[in-house]
Image (spheres, rainbow, N blue to C red):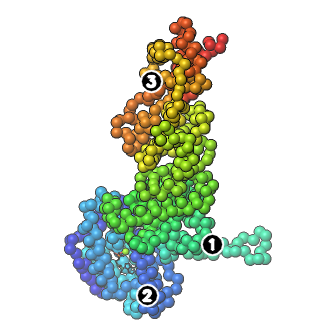
Amino acid sequence: MSTGKINVAVENIFPLIKKFLYSDHEIFLRELVSNATDATIKLKHLTNIGEAQVDYGNPKIEIKIDKDAKKLHIIDQGIGMTEEEVQKYINDIAFSGAEEFLDKYKDSAKDSGIIGHFGLGFYSAFMVASKVEIITKSYKDEPAVHWVCDGSPEFELTPADKTDRGTEIILHIAEDSTEFLKESRIRELLTKYNKFMPVPIKFGTKEEELPLPEDAAEDAEPETKTVDNIINNPNPAWTKQPTDLEEKDYKEFYRELYPMQFEEPLFHIHLNVDYPFNLTGILYFPRLGRDMNIQRDKIQLYQNQVFVTDNVEGIVPEFLTMLRGVIDSPDIPLNVSRSYLQADGAVKKISSYITRKVADKLKSLFNEDRADFEKKWDDIKVVIEYGMLSEDKFFDKAEAFALYPTVDGNYYTYPELEEKLKENQTDKDGKLIFLYASDKDAQHSYIAAAKDKGYEVLLLNSPIVSHLLQKLETSKENISFVRVDGDDVNNLIKKDEEHISKLSEEEKESLKKLLDETIADKAYTVKLEALDSNTAPFTITQPEFMRRMKEMQASGGGGGMFGMGNMPDMYNLVVNTNSELVGEILNTKTKKKQERLISQSLDLARLSQGLLKGEALTNFVKRSYEMIK
Ligand code: ADP
Ligand code: MG
C-alpha cells in the first residue's frame, strides 16, 4: 500500500469544493458519467487504430445505488487506469484542473449564474461524497488499483483484485446529500444530462415481454424476461445525416425530446457544419400562440451529446429562442459568463449561421409548397416578424418569404404587393400607401369603404406589427402604411381630386361653431370635409402616427420617446359637409333639435368604431327609442 499527499497549492480544497456551486451539486453525476463515456470512447478509438489489442465488445456504463451502505457506483468498461495513470490523471492533472477551476471562478461564479459548466471534473464528486473510491484496471496488462480519498488531501493507493477492464467509482454519499441515494432523483439526473450520451447507460433492470410464439393460444400470457434498463438513446437524430432521416424520424425525436408535448412541430431545420466551427442540431418550429408551454420546452444545448443547459441566450439569436430542439457544439465556451459569450467571435459566427440556416429553410419551404406555407403563416409569423425587426440580415432575406395577408385571405410577399398596388394606391405625391386593418370585425365599416374604392386592405394583427411597419417605412423608399380607420376613406390615399363643397364659407363657419359647442368631449377634433354625398356623414378616425406610437410603447421598445403611452386617445371627427344629414342639421330651426341630431350622429360614429360604452351607450339607446316613437 502506498499513501501520498495530493499536491496542494490552495491548502484545503475540499471544503471549498463542497461549498462551491451550492445550487449545482447535481452536476457531479454528469461529470462522472462523462468521464466514463470518455474512457469508453477512447478505448474504441484505440482498438480501431490497432493500438489496443482487446475485444471492444458492447460496453456500457452502469449506475448502481447501494442504499444500505449509502454508496453510489458508476461503473464503466473503458480504458481504465494503471497505477501510474491514477497518480498522473487523478492526483496531479485532475486535481490541478479542479484547483485551477475553483481558483478562477470562486469569486465570479456565484453571481454569474453559470457555475458548474465543465471543468470541475472528477473532484466534483466531493460535493456530495465524504469519501470516494476508484477501482480501476487498465486495458494494458497491468494490475488493478484501488484509490481512496476521504476528502482530505491525503489519499491511499493499493492493489486491487479487479480482473475485468474498466473503472468503478464509488461515492460514499455524505449525510447532507442523501437525496442522491434516491432512485427517482438519480433517474431524473440521468434523464436530464445523459439522455443522449453515446454509450448505453444502465440503471437497474426492467421486465420486457417476449413476443408470443406463432401457435400461441388466444389467451396466452406473454412471457417476460429481465433486461437492462438503458436510460439513454446513444444515437439521437441530430448526430445522423439528414439524408438518413425521414420526416417521421424527426417527429419521433421531437417527442423523445419533449415527452410532455403532444402537439406536432410545424417543421424542422437540421443544422450541420464542421467549418469554421463544429455544430450540429435540429431546430423545430412549434405551433406558437395556442401553446402555453413555450417557457418550459426550450432549445437544449449539448456538448458532444452531454446536456449542458437550456439557456441558449447569446448563442441562438433572441428571435429564435421561441423555437425548440437541440444544438450540439464542442466549440461553445461554457465556463464563461454570458456577457463574455456574446462578445466571443466563434459564438457570434454560430449565431449568424443559425440565422442564415433558418432563413434558407423558410425560403425553401415557401418555394416548395407556397399554399402550405401560407397555411402555417399565422403560427410562425411572430418569429419571422420579430427576426425581421431584430436582425438586419434576416430582414433582407425575409423579403422572399415574409407574407402580408389581405382581409380576403390572399397572401403576398412584399415585392408582389408593391407590384400589385402601385397603380391604384400611389398618392398624388408619388407615395405608395398600404392600407391595413388589425381587426376585421371592429374595423368592418372602414374596410368596406376602402374596398368600395377598389383598395386592397391587408390584415396585420400580430402584437409587434407597428414596429415592423415602422421598420419597413424606414427601409423602403417612399411608402407608408395607414390603418383603414386612420383617416376618412377619401384622405387615406390623397389623390388630385377636386371636392366641391355644397356649403358656402359662412355655412361652414356656423356648422363648425355649432359642432364645437355641442360636442363636449375634448377627445374629438372636428374636421369638415367635402366628401361624396353618399359617404357617411360622421366618421371617427384615429391618426396613424399617434396610434402607432402608443401601440409601440405598449408593446415595448422604440417609439415611446415622447411618452406617448400616457397620452389620452385622440380622435378626429370627420364631418361630411356634402351629406344630406349635415344639410338637414344646418337647416333645422330649433337649437334643441340640432343638438339632438348631432349627438345622435356622433354616437352612431362612435358605435361603428366600438367607442360607445357605459352611460353614453345607455343614453344613445334611450334617445334612439324616443326618435322612432
Ligand atoms: P477531464 O475529464 O476534463 O479530463 P476530470 O477531472 O473529469 O477532467 O478527469 C481527469 C482525468 O482522469 C481524465 O482526463 C482521465 O484521464 C482520468 N479519468 C477520470 N475518470 C476516468 C475513468 N472513468 N476511466 C478512465 N480514466 C478516467
Ligand atoms: Mg471529466
Q: Quadrant of residue 264?
A: bottom right
Q: Quadrant of ligand 1?
A: bottom left
Q: Classify the position of the N terminus by image quarter.
A: bottom left
Q: Nearer the viewer, residue 501 or 392?
A: 501
Q: Residues within 10 Å of mark 3 (few under 14, many from 20)?
A: some
Q: Give the labeled residue for mark 2.
A: 46
Compute the Cα span from label 1 to label 3: 78 Å
The numbered mark at residue 208 is 1
Please tell me which residue is depicted at 61% across the width and 25% down the height of the picture: 534
Going by the numbered disc 2, the residue's amino acid type is: Leu
Please tell me which residue is depicted at 25% across the width and 67% down the height of the picture: 104
> x and y percent of residue 256 in the render?
55, 64
Q: Residues within 10 Å of mark 2 (few under 14, many from 20)?
A: some
Going by the numbered disc 3, the residue's amino acid type is: Thr
Nearer to us: label 1 or label 3? 3
> x and y percent of residue 552 in the render?
42, 41
Q: Nearer the viewer, residue 182 or 311?
A: 311
Relative to 103, residue 396 above or below: above
Q: Are marks 1 and 2 in contact (CB under 8 Å)?
A: no
The numbered mark at residue 525 is 3
Nearer to us: label 3 or label 2? 3
